Amino acid sequence: MRNTISNKAAKVLVSGILAASMCPAAAWATVADDANSASDVTAQSVQVSPQATGCQKAAENVNTTKAAYDAAKADTKTAQQAYDTAKANYDAAVADKDAAQEQLASDTDALKDANNKLQAAQQALTDAQSAQATAQANVDSAKSAYDDAIAQQKLGSYGFFQWLGDEKALSTFQTGAYNSKASSYMSIGAAGDSTSLDNLKAASNWVRTCNQVRASEKTDPTSGNALGDLLIDPYLVAVAEVHTDWSAQNIGHAQIFSTYENVAWGQSNPFSYANGWMEEKEIYESGDHSFSNTGHYLNICNANLKYTGFAVCNKSGTLYGICYGQDFMTYLTGSKAYTPDEWDAKISEYESSMTQAINAYNSAVSALNSATATTQQAQSNLTSAQNKVTTCQNAVTADNQKLTEASNKVDSTWSEQDQANTALSKAQIAESQAKASYESAVYYLNNLPDSAHEWGTWRTVKAPTTTEEGTQKANCVSCGVATTRTTEKAAQDDTTVFPDVPTADAEDHTWYSSCVYAAADLGLVKGYSTGNFGPADTLTRGQAAVILWRFFEGENAAKASVEGSVNQTGMADVLDGQYYTNAANWATSVGVINGKGVDGSRLFDPNGTITRQELCVIIANAAAKLNGQYLDADEDTLAKMPDAGDVSNWATNNVSWCLENGIINGADVNGTKYVQPQKTVTRAEMAAILTNAINQNSI
């Protein structure tokens, strides 16, 4: 005989796929979870009989060292988690420090750039202030000439006469006759006054008109002498201005100075032949040669009159809106007379002298305004640059503080990581020692002589054939250690054949063929009275109990009678004398099936279906209770399955154990394996899962 106890350290996962490892995976449909099936989950640990003597202490030592080993693994896991956390904290601290260094470098560069821009802004302000000072000096320099030009403009024609240096013309405004009669009617240089520069320029055009009339008339009507162009005498211009301003508000000739004087009011053209001075020509030609009726005409066409002056007044209060005045003399009173073009040229020259000063001043003021705006902008830019430097300095200060804190964090987390690493190393050493102790205890228990054990019921795990011996297995009722023995070859071939299940060597064999016939050879499944197996039929809880009962109780189960069987489960829905009654009694007594809680009562539900996760729990119960299996499982195996979340909490450890031990392998759906924990189990699937468990030495 060979004594063995499983020392597999099954790893628990949270997801997986249930399928037979011996047979190709079948497609599974999903059904609702029955949470009450948690009642089938038990402590699932090896129980040591108080009566055991030879192996009891060895089994207790296995349990004790196993518990220590489990605790050591838990400590290692905790230490590993603590180390992972400490390392993550250290890595994060290093990353924070690196980030702080990068930020400090970036902000230091920004501060350097800001200082460079501040220096540039300071220089720009200095340059702008210098340019503004220069512009202000230019304004101050041009201001005197500007003021003189404005003052000169306000003098009108009087200023022009001053510029000409014509004292004779200037004297016109200083005579007693002027002061006593005309001064009150004049506003020297004012707009609309005859002395305004605009009217001074307009007057020369009327002299041209007069010369055109004389050229048209050609001869003097009284002497017959030829008429030449009149020249402009500045003195006569001044006289015409005095006379015209007076006449603008008085109908009549002023006659303040001794000249030939023409006056007109309201006409658009005082030389008009229709209603102007030349209208008198018609009177003269009619025979009326009186000066009182034809004097204007005769003055214009007098060949002896060589010099003239003309004036226009259109200021407010002027009678009929506008007044024209022209004075004539036969001789030149001053030093120079001018043609109309020469007169205009002199006026332009005079205005240009003032315009240059005014424009120079205005240009200087514009330049000053621009320089001032530039200075203001430079000052604003300097303020912005100063603020930027302050901001950057504050950022660098904050960065240095953060870097210090980050460096301190690196130091502290490094220390914590080092401590966690030391603790992990100690935990790993302790786990290794605990594992060695546990494996030593298992080895000792497995190698005890048969006399130290009390063997339970023998169960066939390999059916004998006519050519090969069979194998039976039993467990010590005290410690759970397993042993095997061979059985004789079969005297004859009594292999069961189900009409609805092709044999494994048939061309039309299915994924479950070998599994079903393996279970049948072991006497675990026998089919219906019709001879069929019903592979696609839904497995009931009663059928599952019968199959496991047959496996674990072997000859005892074969000898048991259905008739006279009595319900001993304490569950009301287990009826006497049914095919499942003996199996239900056995399953509940050994703790393989513990029933379901329904409305406050516990029921076996023999005709109810069973889900894949419920079958995992039942198989695990059998492994723990009847084959000495330790059901620690690594849930990482289950976690890899895409539908792991569908597994109920109460079934997680058992499903993980079944996955890890190859009892279930998952159902393949389009290349992906699924646990399908809520899927109802068929009879063929039960055969596959059970034979997997037997082949894996799990039961």
Image (tube, helix red, strand yellow):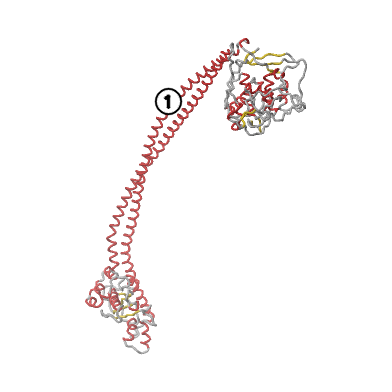
364 or 585, nearer to the observer: 585
Q: In this view, does 559 lie above or below 574?
A: above
Point out the image quarter for the C terminus.
top right
Q: Position of residue 668 (x, y in %)?
A: 66, 31
Point out the image quarter for the N terminus.
top right
Q: What element carries label 1?
A: helix
338 or 613, nearer to the observer: 613
Left-right relation of 603 to 245? right
The residue under the point 48% across, 21% down is 425
Q: In this view, does 539 lie above or below 387?
A: above
User: Circle 1 is placed at which residue position?
Assistant: 415
Identity of the residue furthest to the left in this view: 176
Q: Position of residue 215 (x, y in %)?
A: 37, 79
452 or 488, nearer to the observer: 452
Within-10-Å neighbours for mark 1: few <14, some 14–19, many 20+: some
Asked whether residue 606 appears in the rendered view, the answer is yes
Q: In this view, does 107 lie above or below 207?
A: above
Q: In which quarter of the image is residue 443?
A: top right
Q: Quadrant of residue 539?
A: top right
Q: Quadrant of residue 451?
A: top right
Q: How many labels does the image show?
A: 1
322 or 541, nearer to the observer: 541
Q: Where is residue 150 in the image (x, y as percent from the top left)?
A: 29, 64
Asked whether residue 518 appears in the rendered view, the answer is no
Q: Is residue 660 above or below residue 383?
A: above
Q: Where is residue 635 in the image (x, y as percent from the top left)?
A: 57, 27
- The type of residue carrying mark 1 is Ser
